[in-house]
Structures are given as C-alpha cells and as structure tokens.
Image: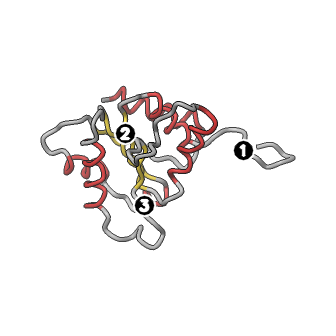
C-alpha cells in the first residue's frame, strides 16, 4: 500500500482467480460467498478485458455465487450448493467446474469435496475445489486456479 493514499497496489486473490477463469473459455466457477462476489467480475470486464464473457446479459454467468449472507451462513446450505454446481455443469459449453469459498464461509468447515462427490457421483464434467485464502494478491489467485486445473 502506498503511505500517502492507503490504496492497495495489487488486486486481490479473488480478482486473480477470476482472471484465470476468464482465460479458460469453458471454465465455470461457483463461489460460496455473499452478494459482493460478482462485483469483482465486473472489474475484469470494465478494466481488463472488454471481451470477457464471465458475466452474460442473459444471466448465464461463468462466475456464480451462493448468495450466503451473514444471517444464513450458519444454516445448512449444502443442498443448494450441490444444485448450484450441478446447474453450472449442465450449462452448454461447460468443460470444467471449479468451486471455492470466501473466508466467511470457509471458517464453517464445509466439506466442499464431499459436495462435489454428491453432485457428480458418476463423474461427468471435471469438478475441482480451489483453495480459499484470506491473504494473497491476484497472482496467488491466478496461480491457485492454474494449479487446481493442472492437478486434475
């Protein structure tokens, strides 16, 4: 951060993850997070890639979020997450689904790997969990997506 303005010099981990998803044209990403998560995808279109298709005017966004709120984070949203990730995988052109969470959701210890097994008991579209991080910049987020894909 600069001393004079206090403005972060590096975009966040999540911005980097979104940039990596943006680079993989058939990748879809579900983030267990509140409603602030999609606004970061808007930054990519508005500042990085005017041709980005992470967000779609018809609502078929490649970046989706669970809509978890502070008032619902402690409730059982697992069935909704399973349905959300299955819906993404059924989107025409989807080649891979990735899932992660904001730290607010991650602290609950939800077993996202188990949810993917429940969503895809017989295989299908490749589906992976991207590590959630509370620190790191955009390069760490970009790296996390690429490492996740490479490990698969």
Q: Which mark is residue 114?
A: none
Residue 41, percent from left and from top? 53, 44
Q: Find the distance from the CA under tag 3 to the CA under tag 1.
A: 26 Å
- Residue at (47% x, 33% y) in the render: 22
Q: Element under label 1?
A: loop
**Would residue 46 be found to the left or right of residue 14 on screen?**
right
Q: Nearer the viewer, residue 56 or 112?
A: 56
Q: Which mark is residue 67?
A: 3
**Earlier residue among tags 2 and 1:** 1
The residue furthest bottom is 71
Classed neighbour count for the residue bearing mark 3: other residues with Cα under 10 Å, few (<14), some (14–19), many (≥20): some
Query: Which quadrant of the structure image shows residue 25?
Result: top left
Q: Nearer the viewer, residue 141 or 18?
A: 18
Q: Which residue is mark 1?
A: 8
**Depicted 92 relative to depicted 132: above or below:** above
Q: Which residue is mark 2?
A: 28
**Earlier residue among tags 3 and 2:** 2
Residue 81, percent from left and from top? 31, 56
Classed neighbour count for the residue bearing mark 1: other residues with Cα under 10 Å, few (<14), some (14–19), many (≥20): few
Q: Element under label 3?
A: loop
Q: Element under label 2?
A: strand
């Amino acid at each position: 951060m600069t001393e004079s303005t206090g403005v972060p010099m590096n975009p966040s981990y999540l911005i980097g993850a979104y940039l990596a998803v943006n680079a993989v044209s058939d990748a879809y990403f579900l983030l267990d997070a509140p409603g602030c998560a999609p606004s970061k995808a808007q930054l990519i279109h508005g500042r990085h890639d005017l041709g980005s298709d992470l967000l779609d005017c018809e609502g078929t966004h490649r970046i989706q979020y669970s809509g978890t709120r502070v008032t619902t984070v402690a409730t059982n949203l697992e069935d909704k997450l399973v349905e959300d990730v299955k819906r993404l995988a059924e989107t025409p052109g989807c080649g891979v689904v990735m899932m992660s969470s904001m730290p607010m959701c991650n602290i609950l210890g939800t077993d996202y790997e188990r949810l993917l097994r429940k969503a895809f008991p017989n295989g299908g579209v490749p589906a992976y969990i991207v590590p959630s991080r509370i620190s790191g910049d955009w390069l760490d987020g970009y790296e996390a997506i690429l490492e996740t894909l490479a490990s698969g």
